[in-house]
Image: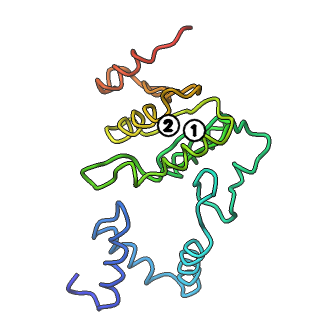
Amino acid sequence: MKAYAQPIKRLISELGKLPGIGEKTATRLANYILRASVDDVKKLAESIIEVKRKIKFCKTCLNLTEEDICHICHDKTRDHGIICVVEEPDAMAAIEESGGFRGTYHVLHGALAPLDGIGPDNLHLGELMRRINSDKIKEIIIATNPDVQGEATALLIMKMIKGKNIKVTRIAMGVPMGGDLKYIDKMTISKSLEFRRGM
């Protein structure tokens, strides 16, 4: 980075702070920005500022929205008695794009990770419990990631809801469609057998 002028070094440094962006990728992005037209760079900068100014959490589910209540929570055709709990807005978007779910969501904005300083107070579990206590919720679908943090978060949510007259389910985990069993890891095969269903 020594060869670059100070403003370019600063841009590379700022781009390198983005998740999944290392120094090489940050340098490629900086060079792309340098080659782009002033108009395109202005549009990029304005879109970043607009997102920071306009986007906020939905007051119900904590999804990212421009309004106080997101379009999903506002939709009367959805089943508001079912809440699908996800870690991040991108997981919610993936479920939405599948087209197979017509309930509502609750976005935690993270998962339990004590080593990274993320405990129950850092997640939006209080808001979830308020929804459960005030609305007529019949089912909670836990759709946290199938990793250590996601499983710990799922167990905590199950403990919090225990004793309430609410059905708690966990998304199925297992072999992906079109997958070949000989290439599937042991944990996935184990979960596939555990969550087997009738035909």
The answer to whether 84 appears left or right of 173 in the picture is right
- Residue at 51 percent across and 26 percent down: it is 163
Is disc 2 surrounded by few (<14), some (14 to 19) or many (20+) residues within 10 Å? many
- Quarter-of-image position of residue 28: bottom left
Is residue 42 depicted above or below 125 in this figure? below
Q: Amino acid at mark 2?
A: Ala
Q: Amino acid at mark 1?
A: Cys
Mark 2 lies on residue: 143
Is residue 38 depicted above or below 154 in this figure? below
Q: Report the residue that reaches farthest toward the right.
A: 76
Q: Position of residue 138 (x, y in %)?
A: 64, 29
Total marks placed: 2
Q: Position of residue 47 (x, y in %)?
A: 58, 75
Is disc 1 surrounded by few (<14), some (14 to 19) or many (20+) residues within 10 Å? many
Proximity of marks 1 and 2: CB atoms separated by less than 8 Å: yes
The answer to whether 102 appears left or right of 188 in the picture is right
Quarter holding the N terminus is bottom left
Mark 1 lies on residue: 84
Is residue 78 depicted above or below 46 in this figure? above
- Residue at 34 percent across and 50 percent down: it is 119
Label 2 element class: loop
> Which of the numbered marks, if any, corresponds to residue 154?
none
- Residue at 33 percent across and 71 percent down: it is 16
Residue sitting nearer the eye, 57 or 42: 57
Q: Earlier in the sequence, mark 1 or mark 2?
A: 1
Is residue 88 depicted above or below 187 in this figure? below
Q: Position of residue 172 (x, y in %)?
A: 48, 26
The answer to whether 139 appears left or right of 67 in the picture is left
